[in-house]
Amino acid sequence: MTEFPIFSKAPFFFKLQALFPYIQGASFIAKGLRRKDWQGLNELFTSPPSTTKALYQPNVYFDHVALPVVKLPGKTPLSSVPGLKQLDESTQGELGCNELVGQFLSEEKAAADCAAWMGDSYVVYEDPATQSYALLARTRWANADSALAFFHDYHSILTQKYPGFSPDSHSDAERIFGRTASGNVILLYAGDEVRWAEGVPSKKVGAMLRWLEAL
């Protein structure tokens, strides 16, 4: 880092994204060589890893561990909101989890908590007229304890994303409700999952809560 001071001052998520192929990629290949050999690594060309979790945890790939498929229904309570258009739908993966938690909290917190990531899905909406956005997300974790850890992580992230954000009187140990300048926020802890919505119009809060709880 001392050789590249500009890079060392870049946001954490950018540095992690840039270094990931070299650090996790190299350790992944090294793990493969210890388990197989160069000939055995031919599998990588015919069936490459489908998730960044395999790069962080090579046994997931080499032991053919089946990860859960985490989906969001095509229709959401925001699908019918006038002016809102779906902008993106994807998954963040373990890499995205590390970028998120590492950027807002700490690299150490990301390494400790994101290793338990098992699957996720998110969808982003945009209102071009107001240049505002809404986010719906669903994540699954190795167990209820790791889900709870991320639930607390994301609560802390919300307070940084939205200065002045705090839970309202309807919140409890497993549900956080609050309002920001961009709209309402709902964060739920549900067994081995954490689900949330940001930028929800007030008239859609009830429907969004029921939708998140029913996933």
Image (cartoon, grey):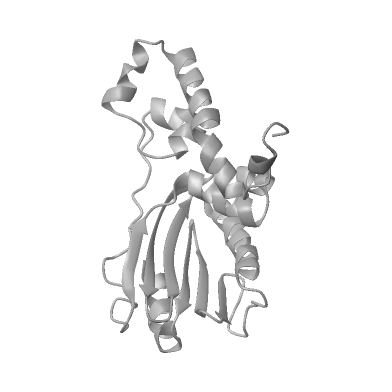
User: Quick one: 184 or 13, which is closer to the camera?
Assistant: 13
Residue nearer the viewer, 207 or 99: 99
Q: Nearer the viewer, residue 67 or 38?
A: 38
Q: Residue at x 44, y 34 (%)?
A: 54
**Number of marks drawn:** 0
Quadrant (top left, top right, bottom left, bottom right) of the N terminus: top right
Residue 71 drawn at (x, y percent) = 33, 57
Q: What is the quadrant of the C terminus in the image? A: bottom left
In percent of the image, x 65 and y 70: which residue is there?
159
114 left or right of 87 in image? right
Is residue 14 visible in the rendered structure shown here?
Answer: yes
The reply to whether residue 113 is visible in this rendering is no
Q: Residue visible at 67% across and 55% down?
A: 105
Query: Does residue 28 sit above or below 77 in this rendering?
Result: above
Picture quadrant where residue 124 is located: bottom left
Looking at the image, residue 149 sits to the left or right of residue 190; the answer is right
Whether residue 153 is situated above or below residue 205 in the rendered picture:
above
Q: Residue furthest right?
A: 2
Q: Position of residue 194 (x, y in %)?
A: 49, 61
**Residue 14, position as x, y percentages in the image:** 56, 46
In this picture, is 44 found above or below 161? above
Tell me residue 157's x, y (percent).
Answer: 62, 63
